[in-house]
Image (tube, grey):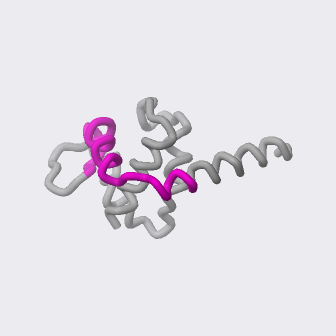
Amino acid sequence: MSEAFKSLVACFALAIVAQSAAADPQHGKDIAKRWCANCHVVESGQSNAIDHAPPFGQIARTPDFDRTKLAFLLLRPHPNMPSLSLDRTEISNLADYISSLK
């Protein structure tokens, strides 16, 4: 891996961590309801979800859960989830909401 790429990743990680200080879990909950609730259980009392999408509470209680890793995962497109049109602040809010469910 090139030094430039490593520096870019480090800067990006610092930006996400810096944003987490101002993250808003309530806004993250609103984002989860809008973007994620079709597949995941995003809050207690929700009854519809698909079988292979883990509930957010389960994700939060995973022993190696890390909100920064989750934020990076959400920034990268992957086949199990639709492409999210969220900016870094929204992703940080969403990650903080999930983290609050521990």
Quadrant housing residue 69:
bottom right
Q: Nearer the viewer, residue 61 or 33?
A: 33
Q: Position of residue 5 (x, y in %)?
A: 78, 42
Q: Position of residue 30 (x, y in %)?
A: 28, 43
Number of marks present in the image shown: 0
Q: Name the residue rendered at 54%, 55% in the picture.
A: 68
Q: Name the residue rendered at 49%, 55% in the picture.
A: 20
Does residue 6 belong to the magenta stretch?
no
Q: Is residue 46 left or right of residue 59?
A: left
Q: Residue furthest right?
A: 3
Q: Is residue 101 left or right of residue 76?
A: left
Q: Is residue 45 above or below residue 89?
A: below
Quarter of the picture containing the N terminus is top right
Q: Residue furthest bottom?
A: 63
Q: Position of residue 18 (x, y in %)?
A: 57, 54
Quarter of the picture containing the C terminus is bottom left
Give the extent of the magenta segment. Answer: 17-42
Q: Is residue 23 left or right of residue 56?
A: right
Q: Name the residue rendered at 44%, 34% in the picture.
A: 86
Q: Nearer the viewer, residue 25 or 38?
A: 25
Quadrant housing residue 62:
bottom left
Quadrant housing residue 35:
top left
Q: Is residue 1 left or right of residue 62?
A: right
Q: Nearer the viewer, residue 52 or 69?
A: 69
Q: Nearer the viewer, residue 54 or 73?
A: 73
Q: Position of residue 27 (x, y in %)?
A: 32, 46
